[in-house]
Image: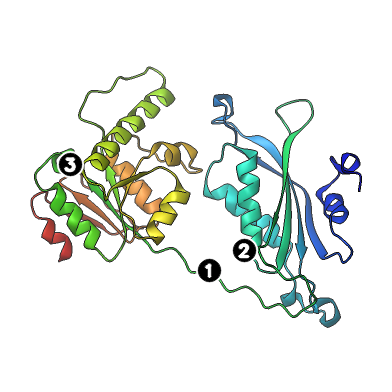
Amino acid sequence: MDETAIAFEHPAVRAAATSGADPLDRISVRDYVCDIEIGAFQAERGVKQRVRFNVVLEVSRTTAAQDDDVDKVISYDSITEAIDLQLSTERINLLETLAERIAERCLEDVRVIRAFVRIEKLDRIPGTLGVEIVRSQKGAAQSLRQVEKPKPQDASPHPLVAFISNTVLHGPNLKAWLDVLEAQPEPAIICVGKAEVSAPHAAHKLADRRIGLLSIEQNAWVLAGQDDRCVVVDSRTELDWAVKHEQMSVWAPSKIVLDAIEKPKVDAEHPERLALWFAEMFQAARFVLIGSDAQMTSEEVPVISLPLDNPDLLNT
C-alpha cells in the first residue's frame, strides 16, 4: 500500500487499502453537507459555515443478503442520524472532537467494526480544511455470523438540579442543605448565582455575558472550597459521568451556555432562570429553589421552592 498515494482519497478507498486479506462489508455516506456553527476562533461564533461529512462503516457480515432481510443490515440513515444528533446536542470547537463523537455514536452499534470519519470545512479557505479519523470496535469479531440488533443502552438517571442562593451559600445551614441533597434518591447538581463581589460590565453584549458567567463560576468554586463533596463541573460529558456515578456536582455554566445549540434567553443577571434552563436541558427529575424569592414554573421540570432555614422540607 502506498499511503502517500491514498492520503487524500475518499475514506472508502482508505478503508479498502487497510482491509487485509479478508475484507469486511462497508456502508458509506458521501458528501453530506450541513450548515453549522463550529470553530474555536471568535470569528466563528454566532455564524454558520458549510461542513462536509464522509463516513464509511466496516460492518460484520451477516446473512442479510441471502435472506433479503432489511432488519439484519445497518441502515444508511443511522450514519446521517449520528451526525444530526451530534450536531443538535452541543456546539463543538474542534473538527477532531466532532469526528470523535460521531465515530463513537456509530460504534455504539456492535455490528460496526471500524468507523472512518472525514469532516471538512468548505468556507474557511479557497480549498478545504479537514480531519479524518479511524476508530475500531474493541474486541469485535469479524467472522461471518448472525448478528442481532443491538439493545438500547440504559439511559442516564435524571438528576435533581438545585439552585442555592448566596444567603444559603454563606449561611449557617449550608452543610445541612448539602447533607439533604446528598441523601436524595437522584444525584444532585447544584447551581449558584453570581459572586457577591461586584463584577465589571462591558459595553459589548457577548463580552458582558462572558463576565457574568465567570462570576457564577467564581461562586461555584467558593462552594467547592467549603465542602469537598462539591465538585465543579463544566462539560456535559463530565456531568453525565457524575450523574451516573452519583457525584454531587456544582455547575460551572460558561462552556455549556456558550456551546449550546439552543442558547438560553436569560443570562447571569437572572441566575435562577439560567439554572432552570439548565435543568430543562438536562431533563432533570426536579428543580429545587433554595432560599430564593424567584417565582418560576416549567412545563418540563417540576419546580419546588423552599425557604432557606428548613432543609428537612426537601424530604417531605
- Is 219 left or right of 25, judged from the image as shown? left
Question: Of callouts 3 and 1, which one flags the residue occurring earlier in the amino acid sequence?
Answer: 1
Disc 1: which residue: 153
Element carrying mark 3? helix
Q: Where residue 145 sits: x, y (%)?
A: 77, 79
Q: For mark 2, does the 10 Å Cα neighbourhood hold few (<14), some (14 to 19), or many (20 or more) residues?
A: some
How far apart are the two marked residues, 3 and 1, measured between alpha carbons?
Answer: 37 Å
Q: Amino acid at mark 2?
A: Glu
Pointers 2 and 1 in contact (CB under 8 A)? yes
Please tell me in which quadrant of the rendered image residue 16 appears. bottom right
Question: Of callouts 2 and 1, which one flags the residue occurring earlier in the amino acid sequence?
Answer: 2
Residue 28, labelled with which disc?
Answer: none
Q: For mark 1, does the 10 Å Cα neighbourhood hold few (<14), some (14 to 19), or many (20 or more) residues?
A: few
What residue is at 59 percent from the left and 29 percent from the top? 44
**Residue occupying the far bottom of the picture:** 67
Q: Amino acid at mark 3?
A: Leu
How far apart are the two marked residues, 2 and 1, measured between alpha carbons?
Answer: 9 Å
What residue is at 30 percent from the left and 43 percent from the top? 273
Question: Of callouts 2 and 3, which one flags the residue occurring earlier in the amino acid sequence?
Answer: 2
Q: Identify the colour scheme used.
A: rainbow
Q: Amino acid at mark 1?
A: Gln
Element carrying mark 1? loop
Above or below 303: residue 219: above
Residue 169, labelled with which disc?
Answer: 3
Q: Where residue 84 sits: x, y (%)?
A: 62, 52
How far apart are the two marked residues, 2 and 3, measured between alpha carbons?
Answer: 41 Å
Disc 2: which residue: 108
Q: Nearer the viewer, residue 275 or 13?
A: 13
